[in-house]
Amino acid sequence: MIEILRTRSVVRTLLRLSVMVILFAGCSAHGVASIPNAAAATFEIGEQAFLLNGEPLQIRCGEIHYARVPREYWKHRIEMVRATGMNAVCVYLFWNFHERREGEFTWQDQADVAEFCRLAQEAGLWVILRPGPYSCAEWEMGGLPWWLLKHEDIALRSRDSRFVEATRRYFEQVGEQLAPLQVTQGGPILMVQVENEYGFYGDDAAYMGEMKQALLDAGFEVPLFACNPPYSIARGFDPDLFQVVNFGSDPDSAFAALREFQPTGPLMCGEFYPAWFDTWGNPHHDGDPSTYIPTLDKMTAMGASYSIYMVHGGTTFGFWAGADRPFKPDTSSYDYDAPVSEAGWTTDAFFMLRDMVQQHLPDGQRIPEPPARNPVISIPAISFSQQAAVLENLPESIQHTEPQTFETLDVYRAGMVYETKLAPGSAGTLRAEAINDFSWVYLDGVFLGVTDRRSRSFEVPLPERSAESRLQIFVWSMGRINFGPEIHDRKGMHGPVTLISESGESTELLDWAHYPLTLEQSYREQLSYRNVSDDQSAQPRFWRATFDLDKTGDSFLDLSRWGKGVVWVNGHALGRFWNIGPTQTMYLPGPWLKPGENEIVVLDLLGPESPVISGRESPVLDQLRPELDFSGPRRKLRELNLESHLPHQKVSFENSPSKQVVHFDQLARGRYFCLLTQDSWNEEIVASVGEIDLLDSEGQAISHERWTIAYVSSEERHDMDGTAENAIDGQTSSVWSTYFAHNTPDHPHAIVIDLGREEILSGFTLVPAPGTSKRGRIRNAEIFIGDDLVREP
Ligand code: GLA
């Protein structure tokens, strides 16, 4: 204890001794325009406040990602953020956006982060930089490059030398780009974050030390900091780093948790959530500014600093959207219900935020007006008359005896067709160990069925064959998981594919041809298109059309009559669409259009209801259509089967927002874990859970990779996203809540997790729903563990 306190006071001393560099306005070697009056620029962590040139500075920051805003609009969006009243922007760098192939870096065009920082500075905003190496952010693999996964045994976000060395090379480049833009050198960068919520992932303080050192070696001299949710601060705690805390409500308890580690120094919320991101098939998230603006008001009044995550979310263009745990792919729209909308428009929350901030500013200081909205156009219906079937446009294949993952074959995204021959034989079942993420199976060109990682269903029925037949499995990947240990998310076929005959005999299928479909421009340009009328069969196809415009402007392509796939306009990959929603339109930025002829290419894996697209003047982000899901209902219909079971343990939870750890009296063994509630605190009939983790025999949390929700008695999907999967997605801010919109059912409520295989369990942890509302905080519950806790009706 004494040791900890001593090292912490050393930190504070070190932080106070931040470098002082005198610069003359406009004289930076890199031609950086200086912030007005920023000639002598020091920034330090004081005893009570951040100190800019020795004067207290309250940081009112808004998170915005340059990769999610078309470069042509950077200035506009930065000015929008300034018009909310913020005085800083917080910026993630996504490593994989800058090093797409190992050793090949890009810092140009859309990746020109230095220019983004200069624009922020010109607008009078400070910058807080978050270069990773890991970012999370609903971005492909949390910002880590896919090629790290080519090492089969690599441990990401650890001291694995392959990870550390690759990070160092990347940070060196980040330093070259951005170290000259630190406040100490006349630039806008005040602070740099090390890693991201590492306590959620691991507890190796030495790893955090390595990452910190790599940033120091890259030339960063401004204060370095770490962010974590309140109960993860202790994990991986590096006493040399300034700590900030991430939350979406209840600043008092979050800051109290922070104070246990950092008794003095400014209080800062590193990520304050006004709303939340969306995943395919789950309800759209709306923030409630009438709740969160007062919280920001309170923080502003108490002198705390904060960063609103997101003040402007933008769009995850192309193939860059990630996926949540255990497997919930993120939508391409990253609107986030943020104060500045996806297309850069003001919202009610925008004005409420601006008014709130204005009230705290000194007399006479006015927040600048927002810039004008960019022009918006509608696009009349575009009819598609040309199509090209994927299976008729396969590239060269790569042959292997056993099926390989994408990464092994350098296939970094999109799809791959796996092909082999099947001997004649009786009907049976085709079974794969795991296929990431979806697949469509064809026998001699005839569609047999699909596999789906969401439900971990990896089997399709196989008919009798009288002759040798060609088996094709078209595997489609979504973005790699961006959170938790599942970031080691290799795509494609895992393990053997076997044919199980009706008599139960199993034969491993070998000799696979792999046709990689990364869908580069060079591939798309040489597709052989045919007239639509020549072939109407439902199979993955590209569709191509041109359309003429008199004038350009932002538009929202209506994809609601299409299936699932990707859209390119004039070669720009807009992102993914999927008819199950909630997003039904795709943001098309005006600068990517031109007067005269424009080209649109759609890859639709399922096929459209009708091959027509038009552009609307406003988005549709909140229409779920579960009945259209190509692989059937979200979950199999199951019943609870507890009659013949005794609870393994009875549990009483505290009336507290903190994580609660339950150690079983005895180890338990089973594939299913059931939490059956008895009652909630405050006599509520609702039950809710932020997160459940299960502990193995060593007391370690087990991976959620194989997990699915086998059964839930009730879940709220009307007034909020209270989907049961939220209890196992690793995000404590997303919540499983029982239905409360109408006629709420009373306790007992049951949630059953299918662990995908038998596990030995020594206990579990439960994080209640966050916030002060205490809604549905469970009081008493029974835990069941076994292999038959659910049954099919
Ligand atoms: C965490 C991460 C962010 C983002 C949010 C959810 O707090 O730090 O990168 O993923 O969750 O939007």
Image (cartoon, rainbow, N blue to C red):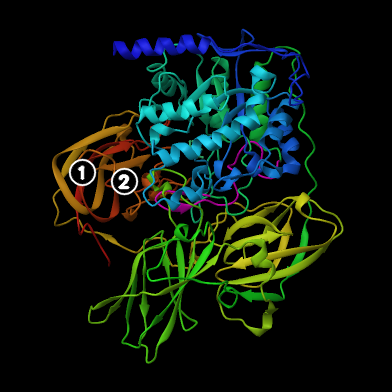
**The quarter of the displayed image where residue 678 is located:** top left
Specify the label residue 746 is tagged with.
2
Q: What residue would you read off at disc 1?
A: 782
Q: Report whether residue 286 is seen.
A: no
Q: Judging from the image, what secondary structure is the residue with disc 2 in? A: loop
The reply to whether the residue tagged 1 has its Cβ within 8 angstroms of ligand 1 is no
What amino acid type is highlighted by mark number 1?
A: Glu
Q: Is residue 373 left or right of residue 321?
A: right
Q: Is residue 611 highlighted in magenta? A: no
Report the quarter where the N terminus lies.
Answer: top left
Alpha carbon distance from label 1 to label 2: 16 Å
- The tag earlier along the polypeptide, 1 or 2, is 2
What amino acid type is highlighted by mark number 2?
A: Asp
Crowd class of label 1 (few under 14; some 14 to 19; many from 20; radius 10 Å): some
Residue that appears at 13% across and 50% down: 646
Q: Is residue 733 left or right of residue 54?
A: left
